[in-house]
Image (spheres, helix red, strand yellow):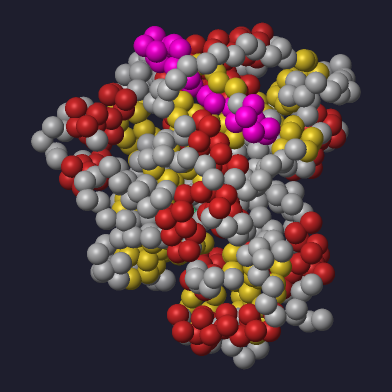
Amino acid sequence: VKRLQAAGFEGVCGHSALQEFSVSNSASFWAAAARQRLNWISPFHTTQDCDLSRGEIKWFEGGKLNVSVNCLDRHVHTCPERVALIWERDEPGSEVKITYRQLLEMTCRLGNMLRRRGVRKGDCVTIYMPPCPLAVASMLACARIGAAHNVVFAGFSAEALAERIRDAQSSTVITVNQGVRGGKVTELKKAVDTALQSCPTVQQVFVAMRTENPVAMTARDIVMEEYVFNYSDGDVFGCVADIGWITGHSYSVYGPLANGGTTVLFESTPIYPDPGRYWEMVQRLKINQFYGAPTALRLLLKYGDQWVHKYDRSTLKTLGSVGEPINTEAWEWYHRVVGDGRCPVVDTWWQTETGGICITPRPSEPDAEIVPGMAMRPFFGIEPVLMDTEGKVLTSNDTSGALCIAQPWPGMARTIHNDHQRFTETYCQPYPGYFFTGDGAYRSKEGYYQITGRLDDVINVSGHRIGTAEIEDNQYSAVAESAIIGYPHNIKGQGVYAFVVLKKGVNAQEEELSRQLNNMVSKKIAKYACPDFIQFVHRLPKTRSGKIMRRVLRKVVEQDLNGLGDLSTLDDPAAVEEIIQEKKIGQ
Ligand code: 6R9
């Protein structure tokens, strides 16, 4: 806020006033922020020229900048030996630190290599690597030479990779020989070879060596070198998202680097080698901000507090959550146990399409209130609105509706690659003049926002519309997490089917647990919201970024096993098999 105020808003005091200013004087706010926070090769002449109803979004026209220069070169001028990346490798205690100077060097070398090998401005390079310095350097090298990058989760199958390579029409792929995750080796280069059987556009594959094991090479493969590492102290931003998720892009790579911070690249899993991994890493790397997903918190919560207490977490200042609604129990645990009650928890709402955080608590504001499980208030330049089912703006508080954003902001998506029509249909046409997020939200009496989940996840039981997240957010102490799915019911319209994961060590009778769960839901919400079926499962099918794949659960409940669709983005496909075997309906 101080830096923004220094950019010409001296008269505007405090977060709230600045937020209001950023919405009512959007163009001058973003123009000043862009001039003050970024280095431009040539200045922009028009700050914004946007028409949401036609899906035409133009920011900073006439301006030219290079994002890799903003992330690297300017920091190398002022503090070359500051640590840019901490690569938290799979094996705890084997972290590697890379300074801004080293990262710039790696990026330039890679950029030159790509250019020498024919990659041009506008090309799209596919990067299929786990989070590691070379992956970040590859992203920045593409940005440096004007190529787009298409980062594919290293956990995706060959088939899923092939589809993404074809969509991007890449001629170049960058990968590693093998990955290492949770103590296991994954055959990434092999997956690339398989994928390329159906990707005629690819002419060259760069292969970095993550392990020492040789892998089969073909004529189009080019082996990359590895680099020397260095050490220096710095501020440490610990975003544990994979770089293949937007959170990894914005908050592991571009955000921290553009701000000259030190960022952690987490290669491992939250439970390898044990459920203390995150907190052991916080202690060892002296992490100041920890940013993760509710799904991981719910997983860790199952194992008990002792894994957290074992480690010193006194360096932590802020705890962030992203990706899904965070249920009250996980929020409380994060705050009370992980943060010892002294670190603010910021539940940050945003999407791939928004580029960065849009609704979030602002703890740096003195006395800022934070309500558990609420994303709270709009961030700079964001004007959220709620719509009713007829497309009218809901103006009062204590109300729920479809979440839209009333005016454009610089980080927003401007199109869908090769399909602008789909962009306008999905985001601009549902509520003409507004950007439609696909999420539902509640605005409290005080005007605070709470995200209630994807609108597709709203179910209608006996005429009552209810978000599945609301039923899931129960504080029953035996439950680690749950997924609620609606299914066709010939009396109620939709019935409620619950998948429930119990905490470790709970071994009460299922019937008794079901009875208690129903009691809780009926007390907290209403009788109609009680599940018709409760299926206790070991785990839920999730994407690599931790989102429960409700589409798949819905198909299982509807007994449409042929309609399960693309399962390649699942973290662990065995979870679906288990659920199918044990399903309770229609047996
Ligand atoms: C950043 C990211 C976007 C969807 C979004 C919403 C859900 C994200 C949330 C949240 C409740 C939060 N979501 N953050 N729901 N509270 N704090 O996750 O991007 O992978 O594109 O997903 O995730 O449903 O629409 P992305």
Q: Is residue 551 above or below residue 56?
A: below
Q: Is residue 162 above or below residue 176?
A: below
Q: Is residue 273 left or right of residue 178?
A: left
Q: Is residue 95 above or below residue 407?
A: above
Between 586 and 215, the one lying in front of the other is 215
- Write down the region rendered in magenta: 72-94
Residue 226: where, in percent of width, then height?
A: 69, 14
Residue 415: where, in percent of width, then height?
A: 50, 41
Figure quadrant of the N terminus: top left
Between 518 and 417, the one lying in front of the other is 518
Q: Is-magenta flag for residue 555? A: no
Number of numbered tags placed on the structure image: 0
Q: Residue at the location (59% across, 69% down)?
A: 479
Residue 532 visible: no
Q: Is residue 398 left or right of residue 421?
A: left
Toward the left, the furthest residue is 11
Residue 227 visible: yes
Residue 456: where, in percent of width, then height?
A: 55, 65
Q: Residue at the location (68% across, 32% down)?
A: 91
Q: Is-magenta flag for residue 92? A: yes
> What is the quadrant of residue 542 in the picture?
bottom right
Q: Is residue 354 above or below residue 375?
A: above
Q: Residue at the location (79% across, 56% down)?
A: 574
Figure quadrant of the C terminus: bottom right
